[in-house]
Amino acid sequence: MSIAKLENVHKVYHIGKIDFPALRGIAFSIDEGEFLSIAGPSGSGKTTVLNLLGCLDKPSRGKIFLEDKDVTALPTSKLADVRRKNIGFVFQTFNLIPVLTAMENVEFPLILGGLHDSKERHRLTEEILTEVGLKDFFHRRPNEMSGGQQQRVAVARALVKRPKLVLADEPTANLDSVTGEEILELMLGLNQKTSTTFVFSTHDKMVMDFARRIIRLRDGKIESDQKVNTK
Amino acid sequence: MKMLLKLAFRNVFRYRRRTVITFSAISYGLGLMAVGICLYNGVNTHAMDSIINTQTAHLKILAPGYFEEKDEVPLEFTIDEPQRIKSLLKENKDIKGIESRILFQASIISGMEELPCLGVAIEPEVDPLVFDIKDSIKDGRFLEPSEPKIILGSTLARDLGLEVGDDCVLRMFLSTEDFIWNALDLEITGIAHTENPTVNRQTVFIPLSLAQEALSLDNRVTELAVRIEDRNRLSDVRESIQSRLATLGTDYEVVSFKEYASDFVELMKMRSRVQVLIPLMMILIATLGIVNTMLMAVLERTREIGMLAAMGMRKMEVMLVFVFEGAIIGLFGSLAACAIGGLGGWYLEAKGFSLSFLGEEITDMLSFLPMEVFRGDLTAGTLLFTLVLGIVVSILASLYPAYKAVKLDPIQALRHVG
Ligand SMILES: Nc1ncnc2c1ncn2[C@@H]1O[C@H](COP(=O)(O)OP(=O)(O)OP(=O)(O)O)[C@@H](O)[C@H]1O
Ligand SMILES: [Mg+2]
């Protein structure tokens, strides 16, 4: 089943009087449970694609579907609701709310999602934090944790509400390669265990190797879209 | 909601520098404002009290024509039967005391020196019911009825180098135009040091019967000064006196202290217009402090705001985080402001502050003011006003930065390198 679909998507940025076409006719479909990498050199449009998939932005032309539902024309406030419910984000940096502990950060999306039962919230939070290997870090603040640990918290936070889709824009770019691999392994493990769909962007060859499918972008177009059978 | 409050609370303590700046802006700005209000209220009431207690009483009964000429203290508009009016009003429970008085132009001569002054002839046995002169006797004692003695205002005595027990000559003018006068040789029995510098500088007191004889007024007086029990009933009492007087078939006027001291009342009104500006400026300073630091906070936390929005937090909720932050700082700032205002106000009420540090020459120049020591008046209302104002101001002042925060496009905010 298709969990997300882009149809002939164009995105034009307006910089003053100049129109800059960042995406020029992108089309692909993502199935449930995929572990997909968007690859390509800097400026090729990776972030733009993820933003569109994540309902943070609207395309200039073309259509976007989430679970066969057309979200292209939804107003901004409705898009926020879609994000709140269905999409988990992992960002490159400055991922967590600095004044909240690991637990509170992970709990946050549950509160936003309207889960009022605090026992249940804590149970889910502790479960997922244990899953990402942070059993002993429940009450640490972000600045008391390493980059890799912070990124684990971010992964836990993206997953705690059991979203349809987790989007990660260069999740390893700020980490050393060993830690980066650990994060990727973690995400892959969760993907296999929970069959949550993951889409992440990268320009790092080694990171791409984890993906089961790689879409390569160049100058706002899809250069190649291939399934890989690795590891 | 609880989550938002928690976030706001933690942010307040995380961004210490901002919190300290905002907190100080509110606590100093509004604290000083509160002290200012205390002083202002105190000066207003005490100044008026001072005038009432030493010069005007609450009400004066005057002969027609006197009021228009009152600055000349004329002797030709007199009340002819003061005793009859007194007994007429004896039943009135609202009245604490009525005193027959004569005001006249005079001068005091001591050796080669002569200084002009205002003569006040009083009934020594009634005066303490109406005025505060008796309590303000610094040296010597108060007058006895009919004795040929005099009380001088303290500044006047000092300027003439006179002390209790000295003799002086009181020259009393029957008419200013013709320079007809009469002189009395009197012993000084007391020096009055009232809270009102005007009185201290220019007034002398003698027994009524002495003045009536010397000014050939028989039983007549120029005014009846009335003190009432409850100042809130001023206009009622005035009307009832007026209607009682009408039964006598006279057309005597009843004038309140507000009319009698209208120059001063005007001065106070003008001053109050100027003084609204001071609190307004304090509020402005506090507001700018909050707006500025909150805008800084929004800028500093651009990425965080972007992330919150990306996670699906609603605009309203993002705004609330910032408004709560402002409100929390505002609450603590206002509490501190109340503490500052309370301490300052309490000090001003208990101790007051005197202009005497400016030296004698300047205080003499300022002696048109009806008091020497400025006392504050601290009320719970002032503190409550400060508290509420502080919270309201800080909430209002964080609205704009909060609005700025939600105006941020989450995509741009996330791209923001910070
Ligand atoms: N808000 C914007 N305004 C103008 N141009 C933009 C904006 N966002 C992106 N672009 C441009 O669109 C193109 C695609 O940007 P995008 O961020 O999607 O690339 P990317 O593949 O994520 O690059 P990187 O690897 O550097 O993150 C770039 O040339 C970029 O300069
Ligand atoms: Mg990018």
Image (cartoon, coloured by chain):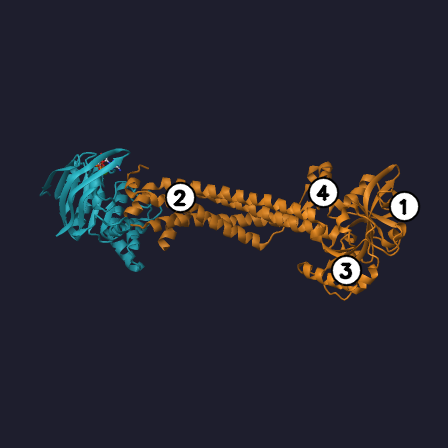
Chain colours: A cyan, B orange
Hey, what amino acid is under mark 2?
Pro
x, y (%) of residue B338? 54, 50
Residue located 27% across and 57% down the image: A123
Q: Which residue is mark 3?
A: B97
Both labels 1 and 4 in a single chain? yes
Q: How far is disc 2 from disc 3 in space, using C-alphas?
A: 62 Å
Hey, what amino acid is under mark 1?
Asn
Both labels 2 and 3 in a single chain? yes
Left/right placement of residue B227 relative to residue A208 reads right
Both labels 3 and 4 in a single chain? yes
Report crowding for label 4: few under 14, some 14 to 19, many 20 or more residues within 10 A (C-alpha): some
Q: Residue B182's mark?
A: 1
Which one is nearer the viewer's eye here, A41 or B371? B371
Q: How far is disc 1 from disc 2 in space, using C-alphas?
A: 78 Å
x, y (%) of residue B113? 86, 37
Please state, as top left, top right, bottom left or bottom right, where the C terminus of chain B lies in the image.
top left
Q: Which residue is mark 2?
A: B401
x, y (%) of residue B179? 87, 42
Mark 3, secondary structure of its residue: strand
Protein chain holding label 2: B
Q: How far is disc 3 from disc 1 in space, using C-alphas?
A: 31 Å
Q: Residue B368's mark?
A: 4
Q: Earlier in the sequence, mark 3 or mark 1?
A: 3
x, y (%) of residue B66? 78, 51
Protein chain holding label 4: B
Q: Earlier in the sequence, mark 4 or mark 2?
A: 4
Hey, what amino acid is under mark 3?
Gly
Question: Which callout, 1 or 2, points to the residue nearer the camera?
Answer: 1
Please state, as top left, top right, bottom left or bottom right, where the N terminus of chain B lies in the image.
bottom left
